[in-house]
Amino acid sequence: PPALPLDGEMALVATGVCGPHCAQLLRETLEVVTNTIGDHQLSPPAVCLLLVGRHPAAVSYAQSSVAAANAAGVVLTVQELPETATNADVANQIALCNLDSKCHGVVLQMPLPLHLDAPGLLSSISDDKDVDCLKESSVRRCLLRTEPTVIPCIAGAVEEVLHSYDVLKSTSSSAHRSRHGHPPVRPHVLLLGVPPLLAFPLELCLEGAGAA
């Protein structure tokens, strides 16, 4: 039978989105920003990534982060802790990073060994150094959008892709439609196979961006 015509939203579902293309555009933007930092004699952003154990997924994510940081001009230091590290061991390392003025951000690489308290350890990261934005307080600040804050990386990536394909509309355009008597359309987003630790910030951020 002949193919049915697809509107913009259905065509997006049928063909998928080009995440790598969006990522490349963001990397090019970051390169411009980091070059500007150097031009102003400012030190580049420095992030400490804590890798506990050798879970294959965690190691893979850490390696990807190193490559992305190098491309973006960010100084990323990976500190490895053994699989047998205790909550106290990891918390002490986080505390040292919190106090280090040369460290601008802290990443606790997931997944952690099962015996560790991931939410508790994440909550011990300083608010101003929670670059993954996985703490509940950080996520809620992001949702309220009342002060400058980083967006959870996965939620930010998804939001950026949806904006680039015009699935999510800007706040100003939504307000314009509302003033003309037409309520803004809220796209529906379905999360499948997302771990709870990541689903919570993703759900809140997308809701704050206008999704349902």
Image (cartoon, rainbow, N blue to C red):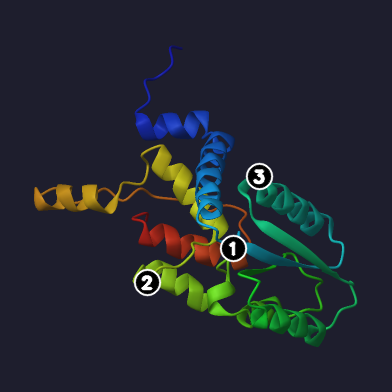
Q: Is residue 118 left or right of residue 153?
A: right
SS under mark 3:
helix
SS under mark 1:
helix
Q: What residue lies at 58% left-to-right and 73% top-to-bottom?
A: 129
| Residue beneath disc 3 | 71
Cβ–Cβ under 8 Å for marks 3 and 2? no
Q: Position of residue 174 (x, y in %)?
A: 23, 50
**Residue 148, located in which quarter of the rendered image?**
bottom left
Of 183 and 35, nearer the camera is 35
Disc 1 from disc 3: Cα separation: 25 Å
* Residue furthest to the left: 180
The answer to which of marks 3 and 2 sits earlier in the sequence is: 3
Amino acid at circle 3:
Ala
Q: Is residue 104 above or below residue 191?
A: below
Q: What residue lies at 64% left-to-right and 83% top-to-bottom?
A: 124
Disc 3 from disc 2: Cα separation: 28 Å
**Residue 122, located in which quarter of the rendered image?**
bottom right
Cβ–Cβ under 8 Å for marks 2 and 1? no
> For residue 198, which numbered disc appears in the image?
1
Cβ–Cβ under 8 Å for marks 1 and 3? no
| Residue beneath disc 2 | 147
